[in-house]
Image (spheres, rainbow, N blue to C red):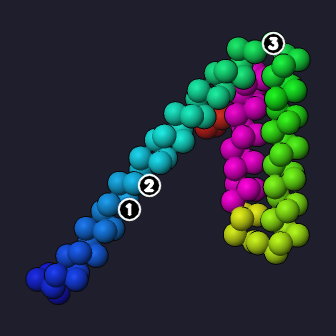
Amino acid sequence: MANDPLYDALLERIEALEAREELLTVTSHAYQVVITTILGNLDTETRDRIITMVDEAHEIAYSQAVNRSDKHLSDIIKGADEIVQRMFNYAQGGAHPDR
């Protein structure tokens, strides 16, 4: 199997996908730091208004996904909401988002 060109192509594709996943993860973490820093440097009233708007947008998107019976999308939105809640908590002076 080690000499099979299809096997080699599959391994190359897996490596490319893993590299892409790692790049997306690093990029996501960088954006989380940037957004958290911006929110942390805003005045409390502005920061809280932004947090409220994002919370409302998440609720609307989640409700729409549930109404369409799109479990995959609703799971993605739930996961994103968990991340953003940690960011908001940290921006408001709470514990570090990775802890």
Residue at position x 25%, y 67% from top? 12
Which secondary structure type mostly characterizes the magenta part of the structure?
helix
The amino acid type found where label 3 is placed reads Asp
Residue at x-position 54% and y-position 38%: 29
Residue matched to label 3: 43
Left or right: 13 in relation to 20:
left
Q: Horizontal and vertical percent for residue 83?
A: 69, 44
3 or 2: tag closer to the N-terminus: 2
Label 1, label 2: how far apart the Cα atoms are: 6 Å
For the image, the number of numbered tags is 3
Residue underneath mark 2: 21
Q: Under tag 1, what secondary structure?
A: helix
Regarding residue 65, the answer to whether it shows in the image is yes
90 over 53 or under it: above or below: above
Separation (CA) of disc 3 from disc 2: 35 Å
| Residue 41 coordinates in the image, percent (x, y) | 70, 14
State the extent of the magenta-drawn residues as a range: 76-96
Q: Amino acid at mark 1?
A: Leu
Please provide percent x and percent y for residue 64: 85, 62
Q: Are marks 1 and 2 in contact (CB under 8 Å)?
A: yes
Label 1 belongs to which residue? Answer: 17
